[in-house]
């Protein structure tokens, strides 16, 4: 494959955007709408909310904790076969979950097996996308990740309809069929080779660089805090609304309204990330803080109008922070290190994904309501925005062309590359 001097900012990259759009829909659209199954699992297995919450948490944690594996395999074999294999695992996990007779079966099938499949799809796809774009990276990310918002809008009421007609076992069979389309998403990926790649060294050299890179480490801590509270509404908002006396279908529809707002937020934020001069990290800090405030205000809202307003606000801000979060990383570590960097970030932030929903469920069991759950979730995001403020000012995104080599060279003057032996890995 011929090496390109810089990302093409288009061409086959738009097909990669299309692949990432459907892939994000089939991974995080399913995860975000899984709160519809939450109430069914509590009733079917007669278990506490905290124990049932581990299903989604294990899935999120596996998706993120296994990301370095997906990154390493993509570096060696390319993203296409890795993502296709991940689609098979994700579909198989949902298929086996439809035969579950205990929560342990759901932990292993949805949490472990489907989670491993998601780990092999999400990170390699976004890393591949980042290598195709430079000037329009935030916009491309925003368009790709709108699949999450669209699918969340469609899947929440759709899953509720499936539950009412086919019960939870039949619904999981159909979700398995949907997940199998991840194989087609992987087939669209085409690896891209850049001239800067050899200068980045092997996996060992890249890992050593990242572990000694202060801004990258602070960014990773921030995303871990954000991840702890980010998914709470998608796991427990439906149950919270039912505690307030809402019927299941209107509660699921409110989740769909948040998904529409999420979709708009992703597109707007992606456009702003490329159009507005200045550090992209500032936009990320702003959206993160606003998301935390909206989460903390959920227990205060009792009237339907207030709940709808908060759901729309949360959807917009939580959607807006996603594309700029992924756009900051290539500018911190260089495009050539994106596979390793994104995989490492996803692995560390899996701690937040693993603990967030069970902590929220535990607080619900202890207090009898979701007030503390949403307040604590908001506090985690506000803490994450505080860490983001410490990121350096070289994270710039402007509509004019910029050389990734200059960014990498500036980084290398601050943090020396590892010794020769590591570079030979």
Image (cartoon, helix red, strand yellow):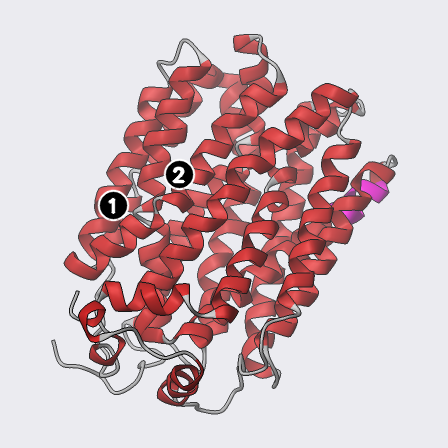
N-terminal label among 1 and 2: 2
Residue at left offset 63%, top offset 38%: 232
In magenta stretch: residue 148:
no
Which is nearer the eye, 9 or 360?
360
The image position of residue 295, as x and y in percent, is: 74, 46
Q: What label does residue 62 carry, if any? A: 2
134 is higher (above) or lower (below) than 376: below
Q: Nearer the viewer, mark 1 or mark 2?
A: 2
- Residue 183, which numbered label? 1
List x then y, in percent, for residue 136. Answer: 45, 78
**Image x and y of residue 354, in percent:** 51, 36
What residue do we see at 68% from left, 48% from top?
380
Residue 88 sits in quarter: top left
The boundaries of the magenta stretch are 305-311
Horizontally, is 126 left or right of 145 in the view? left
Quadrant containing the N terminus in the rendered view? bottom left
Q: Give whichever of 72, 18 is nearer the camera.
A: 72
Q: CA distance from mark 1 to mark 2?
A: 19 Å
> Which of these two is toward me, 13 or 402?
402
User: How many numbered marks, from 0 up?
Assistant: 2
Q: Which mark is residue 402?
A: none
Where, quadrant-wise, is the C terminus in this rendering? bottom left
- Taking 131 as reference, is 256 above or below it? above
- Residue 4 placement: quadrant: bottom left
Query: Compared with residue 118, is residue 269 higher up or lower down, i.e. above or below?
Result: below
Asked if residue 110 lies left or right of residue 266, the reply is: left
Residue 132, can we see it? Answer: no
Q: Residue at x 15, y 57 (%)?
A: 77
Which residue is pictured at 22% across the width and 68% down the height?
Answer: 422
């Amino acid at each position: 494959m011929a090496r390109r001097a810089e990302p093409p900012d288009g061409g086959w990259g738009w097909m990669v955007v299309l692949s990432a759009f459907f892939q994000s829909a089939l991974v995080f659209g399913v995860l975000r709408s899984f709160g519809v199954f939450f109430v069914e699992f509590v009733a079917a297995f007669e278990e506490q909310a905290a124990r049932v919450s581990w299903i989604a948490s294990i899935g999120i944690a596996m998706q993120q904790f296994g990301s370095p594996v997906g990154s390493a395999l993509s570096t060696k074999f390319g993203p296409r076969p890795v993502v296709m294999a991940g689609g098979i695992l994700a579909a198989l996990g949902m298929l086996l979950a439809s035969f579950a007779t205990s929560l342990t079966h759901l932990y292993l099938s949805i949490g472990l097996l489907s989670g491993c499949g998601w780990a092999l799809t999400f990170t390699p796809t976004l890393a591949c996308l980042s290598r195709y774009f430079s000037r329009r990276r935030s916009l491309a990310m925003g368009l790709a990740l709108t699949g999450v918002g669209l699918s969340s809008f469609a899947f929440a009421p759709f899953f509720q309809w499936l539950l009412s007609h086919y019960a939870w076992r039949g619904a999981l069979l159909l979700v398995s069929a949907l997940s199998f389309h991840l194989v087609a998403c992987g087939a669209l990926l085409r690896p891209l080779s850049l001239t800067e790649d050899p200068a980045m060294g092997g996996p060992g050299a890249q890992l050593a660089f990242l572990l000694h890179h202060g801004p990258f480490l602070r960014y990773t801590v921030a995303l871990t805090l954000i991840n702890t509270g980010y998914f709470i509404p998608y796991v427990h908002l439906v149950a919270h609304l039912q505690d307030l006396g809402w019927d299941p279908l209107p509660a699921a529809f409110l989740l769909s309204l948040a998904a529409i707002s999420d979709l708009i937020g992703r597109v707007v934020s992606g456009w702003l990330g490329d159009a507005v001069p200045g550090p992209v990290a500032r936009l990320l800090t702003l959206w993160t803080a606003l998301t935390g405030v909206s989460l903390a205000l959920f227990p205060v809202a009792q009237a339907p109008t207030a709940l709808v307003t908060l759901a729309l606000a949360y959807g917009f801000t939580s959607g807006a922070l996603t594309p700029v979060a992924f756009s900051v990383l290539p500018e911190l570590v260089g495009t050539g290190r994106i596979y390793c960097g994104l995989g490492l970030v996803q692995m560390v932030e899996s701690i937040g994904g693993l603990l967030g929903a069970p902590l929220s469920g535990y607080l619900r069991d202890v207090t009898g309501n979701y007030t503390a759950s949403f307040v604590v979730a908001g506090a985690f995001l506000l803490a994450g925005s505080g860490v983001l403020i410490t990121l350096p000012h070289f994270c710039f995104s402007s509509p004019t062309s910029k050389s990734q080599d200059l960014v990498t060279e500036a980084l290398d003057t601050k943090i020396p590359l590892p010794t020769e032996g590591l570079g030979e890995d």
